[in-house]
Image: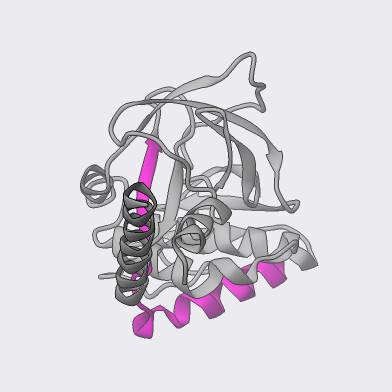
Amino acid sequence: MKLRSVMTILALTGAVPCIAGTPASVVITGFKSGSEQATVINNGATVGTYPAGEFKGFLNGNAFSTFCTDIYQTFSWNSSGNPYSYELKTVAETQGMWGTSPYAVGSYSQVSKLYTTAYASIGASSVKSAAFQFALWELLYEDPASSSYDTGNGNFQLAGGDADTAAAKSQANTWLASLASASEGYSIQALYSSQKQDFLVATPVPEPQTYALALVSLGIVAGYAKRRRSS
């Protein structure tokens, strides 16, 4: 894999150049592949009825896609002329956030596994897009010590909706059941706001051989440049 391919992997997943832990400008323009609606219940209380799916927009002026990680705050579609101010947390900060209430202990690792297992299969399907969001909420808010991952049972639950919502919940449960054998192939950074709904940025972690090939490519480029200067 050439160095250009390594950078292409990052671009295709919505990862953008941004200094971690610094202010970030966020624009959310709509759903990337449509949405499905469900009622969110956490710890026995109804939080609200929301459409669920992958969002599209811009992070610091660069196109990206994201999912919601915050069921307690809301936001509205906005434009580049009226961006929201967020903070892009580092991976370590995100791990710390997602290890304390209201998030479930160990949720960072599980979210990384979910991306590795399921993200590439979403495509243009509103059902799979909603399923990924459902599964993400389940991982963030369900206590794995007291209940297994299931969008219809436990501390965190999803209710209501139509046949497509039911299909999305079923798909989410299928993905959740497969995480035990999955690897953590993504690094996750929280997009945090104290006033609006939180989101995330997920970046695939290149495999060791990819790093090695990238270094070889850089060495070839450097050698070629040196020969050109010598000639």
Q: Nearer the viewer, residue 122 or 64?
A: 64
Residue 227 percent location from the top left of the image? 34, 56
- Please state if 50 lies on the left or on the right of 125 as rendered: left
Residue drawn 30% across the image and 38% down it: 89
Indicate whether 66 appears above or below 18: below
- Please state if 211 lies on the left or on the right of 99 as rendered: right
Q: Quadrant of residue 49?
A: top right
Residue 170 belongs to the span the image colors magenta: yes
Q: Quadrant of residue 36?
A: bottom right
Q: Nearer the viewer, residue 74 or 129?
A: 129
- Spot the residue most to the front: 231
- Spot the residue most to the top: 81
- Spot the residue most to the bottom: 181
Residue 135 visible in rendering: yes
Residue drawn 31% across the image and 27% down it: 22
Residue 23 percent location from the top left of the image? 36, 24
Residue drawn 36% across the image and 64% down it: 220
Q: Nearer the viewer, residue 70 or 120?
A: 120
State the extent of the magenta-drawn residues as a range.
Answer: 166-191
